[in-house]
Amino acid sequence: MPLPANYSATAGPSRRRSQFRPCIDLHQGVVKQIVGGTLDLGDAGLYRQHDLRGGHVIKLGPGNDDAAREALKAWPGGLQVGGGIAVGNAKEWLDAGADKIIVTSFLFPDAKFSEERLAAMSQLVGKDKLVVDISCRKRENGWVVAMNGWKTLTDMVVNQDSIALVEKYCSELLIHAADVEGLCQGIDEELVERLGEWASVPCTYAGGAKDISDLALVDWLSGGKVDLTFGSSLDIFGGSGVKFDELVAVDKAAKQASAA
């Protein structure tokens, strides 16, 4: 669905505008978005410098705890953390400086959704401190939540009912479109549009963003209800599609328009 040529994400009626949400994906203690790179805590510091709040630090597998703690230390209260979060360690990550904790696999024992686990986590840390990560793949019956590196499909289909159920226990949603994640070949436009219809709490979409205009596209598709993560396409992660400084300027304008 092409973005109308005359569309402006900051003009028109007064309403919330889609905004940029930063991310730091960690794999074996290094930033995943940079092939062969090493952890640069300047990323977290850069987000802090520009007051870019609500970004997510995701620990992809073991060996990332120290790097995640360093990132949280660089931007205390400004980042969320996910990856291996369970009832037994959730509070320690909040104590380490995370603004919120992000849960995903913990909610799907044996690939089956457990409302009981979600309720327990919400009660433990508080609804206001809980983000649910819904990583999903497109199938004939819609989008299905995936786990274990997005290789295992669960029994949860992403739709208005499942989103409403999850929202009872959390204050925010993080949606990874696994089919397009990291490819820099464009977002899942249909999913973004549906999220704009279904979500009633703050919602961030991640997957496929390749151009700075994708922020305006997400704003148009979702009516400003869904925010967007840029990862591999960003120049600070070695990408060539999006310049960080330009994105910060566009995001600042979106925030100002939202507050108008």
Image (tube, rainbow, N blue to C red):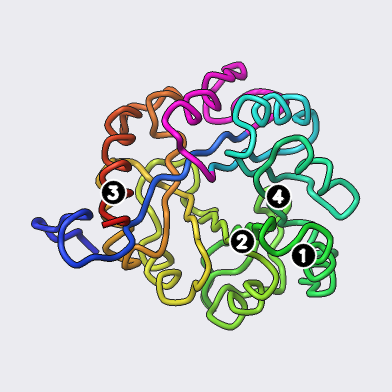
Q: Earlier in the sequence, mark 1 or mark 2?
A: 1
Q: On the rendered structure, is 86 left or right of 169?
A: right
Residue occupying image coordinates x 65% and y 31% = 26
Where residue 171 appears, as percent x and y from the top left, is: 61, 63
Residue positioned most to the right: 88
Q: Nearer the viewer, residue 43 or 110?
A: 43
Residue occupying image coordinates x 61% and y 16% = 38
For the magenta stretch, what is the residue range? 26-54
Quarter occupied by residue 39: top right
Residue occupying image coordinates x 48% and y 30% = 47
- Distance CA(mark 1)–CA(mark 2): 16 Å
Residue under numbered circle 1: 122
Q: Nearer the viewer, residue 12 or 23?
A: 12
Which amino acid type is marked by label 1? Answer: Ser
- Quadrant of image for the N terminus: bottom left
Q: Residues within 10 Å of mark 1 (few under 14, many from 20)?
A: many
Q: Secondary structure at mark 4?
A: strand
Residue under numbered circle 2: 134
- Distance CA(mark 4)–CA(mark 2): 14 Å
Where residue 88 appears, as percent x and y from the top left, is: 91, 50
Residue under numbered circle 3: 256
Of circles 3 and 4, the one toward us is 3
Q: Please determine whether, in this image, residue 33 is positioned above or below residue 3.
A: above
Q: Please determine whether, in this image, residue 219 is positioned above or below residue 46.
A: below
- Distance CA(mark 3)–CA(mark 2): 29 Å
Of circles 3 and 2, the one toward us is 3
